[in-house]
Image (tube, grey):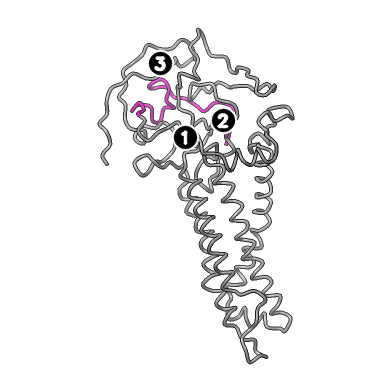
């Protein structure tokens, strides 16, 4: 489909002067489709329907680290175990669990992990539009650096973002890599080439957990098989015929511990309704105003209806905004000092 032609339209909010003073006189801007003029550092595909971050090469590496070892497990290790005949036996090795069944299970876990990875990578994470009139400042003088709001009896600070020219909603932060304010900001993850926020956190959590389960399955299967073979001194002959299995068991063994720790940490975040950023900074003084109990937190974070994007693919943005932070034309704008990564 062809993109609509550029057209002139007034800005939704008048740009402020470079010193944060009075709004400047409204200008006429040339508006273009979102994917052509977005001022952040994101990349778009599928006519603006999919968005990702700044590290697509890292996403390829993550995918390769998933597919490579599992392919080696399915094509190399499992068939070698099934066909292996110990030197002192005349029959094939008998295993306590049908090995083809483990191959089916590994394939299913790989499919879920890859799907979760791609959805985390290409889902718009919850970006807040720049110069949103509902979150801007229209009073005289420079905007205050923060305003206070009470959520369930707890004081929450809404900070002014000098790049996006808005007061950031509760739980949101400005990402230094993507150069956007993101709702329910968790962190920026280069492994998925995207920010992790309100709209894609559940996919990221599923990716981490299912990747851990997949790694654990491959490691336990290969390690137990080698232990069983070692009882009658058959492990070394097997590894000579399948040397890649040694590499596989070492790699998955090294990855199991960090992935397990990361999975446990995000299970804790889900059940407590916290983000990584909130767990580190402790912005509410020990009481989380957004907690709904363990069951309620799980339902809200992982099972609730996904929030609609505030950046529809049909959205028009100023053509001259790209590369300037969406602020005054010609002005260089740095990320705010409380930017998170």
Residue toward you, 202 or 275: 202
Identity of the residue drawn at 48% across and 21% down:
165
**Residue 26 badge:** none
Disc 1 and disc 2: Cα gap in Å? 19 Å
User: Viewed as shown, does residue 285 lie left or right of 218?
Assistant: right
Disc 3 and disc 1: Cα gap in Å? 26 Å
Q: Give the percent coordinates (x, y) of residue 219.
A: 64, 65
The residue labelled by disc 1 is 308
Is residue 180 positioned above or below 253 on the image?
above
Write down the region rendered in magenta. Answer: 316-341
Whether pointer 1 and pointer 2 mark residues with C-beta atoms closer than 8 Å, the reply is no
Q: Earlier in the sequence, mark 2 or mark 3?
A: 3
User: Viewed as shown, does residue 198 lie left or right of 263?
Assistant: left
Q: Earlier in the sequence, mark 1 or mark 2?
A: 2
The residue labelled by disc 2 is 173
* Magenta stretch contains residue 101: no
Q: Give the percent coordinates (x, y) of residue 28.
A: 31, 18
Q: Give the percent coordinates (x, y) of residue 290.
A: 65, 31
The residue labelled by disc 3 is 14
């Amino acid at each position: 489909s062809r993109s609509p032609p550029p057209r002139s339209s007034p800005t939704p909010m008048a740009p402020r002067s470079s010193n944060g003073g009075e709004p400047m006189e409204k200008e006429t801007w040339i508006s273009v489709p979102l994917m052509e003029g977005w001022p952040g550092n994101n990349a778009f595909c599928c006519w603006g329907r999919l968005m990702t971050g700044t590290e697509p090469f890292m996403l390829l590496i993550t995918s390769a680290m998933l597919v490579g070892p599992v392919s080696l497990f399915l094509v190399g290790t499992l068939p070698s175990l099934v066909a292996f005949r110990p030197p002192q036996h005349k029959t094939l090795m008998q295993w306590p669990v049908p090995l083809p069944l483990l191959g089916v299970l590994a394939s299913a876990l790989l499919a879920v992990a890859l799907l979760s990875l791609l959805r985390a990578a290409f889902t718009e994470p919850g970006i807040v539009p720049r110069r949103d009139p509902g979150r801007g400042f229209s009073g005289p003088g420079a905007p205050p650096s923060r305003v206070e709001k009470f959520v369930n009896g707890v004081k929450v600070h809404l900070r002014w973002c000098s790049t996006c020219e808005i007061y950031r909603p509760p739980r949101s932060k400005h990402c230094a890599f993507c150069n956007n304010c993101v709702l329910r900001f968790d962190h920026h993850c280069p492994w998925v080439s995207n920010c992790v926020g309100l709209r894609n956190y559940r996919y990221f959590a599923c990716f981490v957990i299912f990747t851990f389960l997949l790694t654990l399955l491959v490691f336990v299967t290969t390690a137990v098989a080698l232990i069983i073979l070692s009882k009658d001194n058959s492990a070394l002959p097997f590894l000579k015929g399948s040397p890649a299995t040694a590499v596989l068991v070492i790699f998955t063994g090294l990855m199991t511990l960090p992935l397990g720790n990361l999975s446990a940490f995000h299970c804790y975040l889900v059940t407590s309704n916290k983000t990584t950023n909130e767990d580190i900074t402790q912005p509410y003084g020990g009481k989380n105003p957004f907690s709904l109990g363990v069951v309620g937190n799980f339902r809200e974070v992982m099972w609730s209806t996904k929030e609609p994007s505030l950046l529809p693919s049909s959205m028009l943005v100023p053509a001259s905004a790209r590369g300037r932070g969406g602020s005054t034309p010609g002005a260089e704008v740095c990320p705010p000092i409380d930017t998170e990564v």
